[in-house]
Image: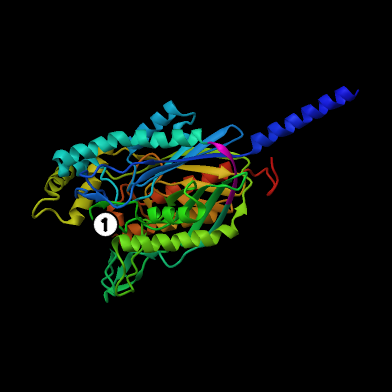
Amino acid sequence: MKLRILVSLALVLSCLVLAANAATMRVGRAAVKITPPVGSPMGNSYGLSISQGVHDDLYAKAMVLEQDGVRTAIVACDTVSLRGAIVAEARRLIESKTSLKGAQVILSATHCHAGPQMHPIFLKQVGGKGEEMGLEYIRALPGLITESVRLAEADLTPARVSATISSEKSLVFNRRFLMKDGSVMMNPGRLNPQSVRPVGDVDAELSVIYFESLESKPLVTLVNYPLHVAIVGGNRFSADYPGVLSRMLAEVKGKDMLTIFTNGTSGNVNHIDSGRKDQLSGNEEAARIGIILASAVLKSYPALQPIDTQPLKVRTDKVDLPVASVSEREVAQARETMSRYGKQNGPSFDDVVRAWRILDLAELKSKPLETEVQAITFGDELAYVGFPGDAFVETGLSIKTNSPFPLTIVSEQSGNGAISYVPNRRAFPEGGYEVNSARFLPGGAELLIDAAGRLLTDLFPYGKSRGQKN
């Protein structure tokens, strides 16, 4: 009888241990250097300049999550964007070298303008050795991204998860201004008497997800903040203010903790305060912003709240956006415009913007622009949304406001490829740089917002009582 009781107790304890292990989230992290070689072209979206040095290194930072047999990953790259061909190849390699499926990974760019130029149209204008180096970098990047995921998966360790959302209002300014002549202009200049007011909102939410080991060792801090990563210029590669943020947090939490920065929706928001006479710029301004954000993150740590991560879910939903057709004459004119870009007496910036848009649309051949929304959800408390393009701040605000998850984070420049700017419907009649850059017809942003809302509704565990495990 005693033996049977002991055996029964052992079986019960074994089941409890297995259940506890299954319920425990595991996290792995890794950072792989992706700094291009000096002499390759700089990015800045339209950049043609050749790099002459490295101010600080660029990285692909990966975090792999696992719970109850579900695995997913978040990767943030210090690049201005990730074009579709790069994403497709990275996902293919990830599937071949790890246990994750491509659709289980949210790949994103920090939108770092001081990174590499990776668009073939602009690399062609650079030509020569610079073009060769740029194309070689494009071929190598998917493998580097994959290596970050592979290393992160090999690093899986049991972890606790907590999160908080605070605010840092001093850094974000809507850059689209109504002018006295009725037009809308991006960054009209400091104290411009012809500017009336900004025509959009700002989002000052600073979101933090913190992962620590069961022994309270810091593992990962994921920071999301909606501010254009376009402060650093010049001819030296730099991760901009997210690089400063990472270094500052490492000084406090230890170098073994990985900081992953993802950009909130900030297509119409930047750091320029047009109401000030002057302001720091370049690396000095990036340092100021990074230090302020690091301070805000450090102040938010005591407010972190434990997250019940069960169930962990991940899903990717495809979205097709309607586009305008372009004529053969428009395509020919666009090619002629781009052939003169970067040369003496070349085309205006506005002409280059229009030409690039036309050439991208020509590749679609009037077919819809294929993109996607993604989400990773933690129980009924936290959702992390991967959203494509350089999206207006209003899109992120709408998704967060209507999400069933009380803590919802939106990461722009995510998904299956770069789609340029994502203005809301209201912005299209206003015009301006961002609208002229948009590849889709009015209403495209709202289609993406609706898709994200349906995705979050589908993933929300409505049968679960708040604070209770399934």
| Secondary structure category for the residue under label 1 | loop
Q: Quadrant of the N terminus?
A: top right
Identify the residue at image location x=49%, y=28%: 99
Q: Is residue 302 visible?
A: yes
Q: Judge left or right: residue 210 versus residue 333.
A: right
- In the image, residue 121 sits, relative to residue 438, either above or below, namely above
Percent position (x, y) of residue 411?
Answer: 44, 49
Q: Is residue 424 visible?
A: no
Identify the residue at image location x=32%, y=51%: 56
The majority secondary structure of the magenta stretch comes to: strand
Percent position (x, y) of residue 141?
Answer: 32, 37
Q: Which residue is mark 1?
A: 233
Is residue 184 shown in magenta? no
Nearer the observer, 29 or 419? 29
Q: Judge left or right: residue 349 versus residue 34.
A: left
Q: Quadrant of the C terminus?
A: top right
Percent position (x, y) of residue 184?
Answer: 29, 65
Identify the residue at image location x=37%, y=57%: 241
Percent position (x, y) of residue 114?
Answer: 29, 52
Tell me which amino acid carries mark 1. Answer: Gly
Nearer the observer, 4 or 384? 4
Nearer the observer, 130 or 91? 130
- Which stretch appears magenta? 156-162
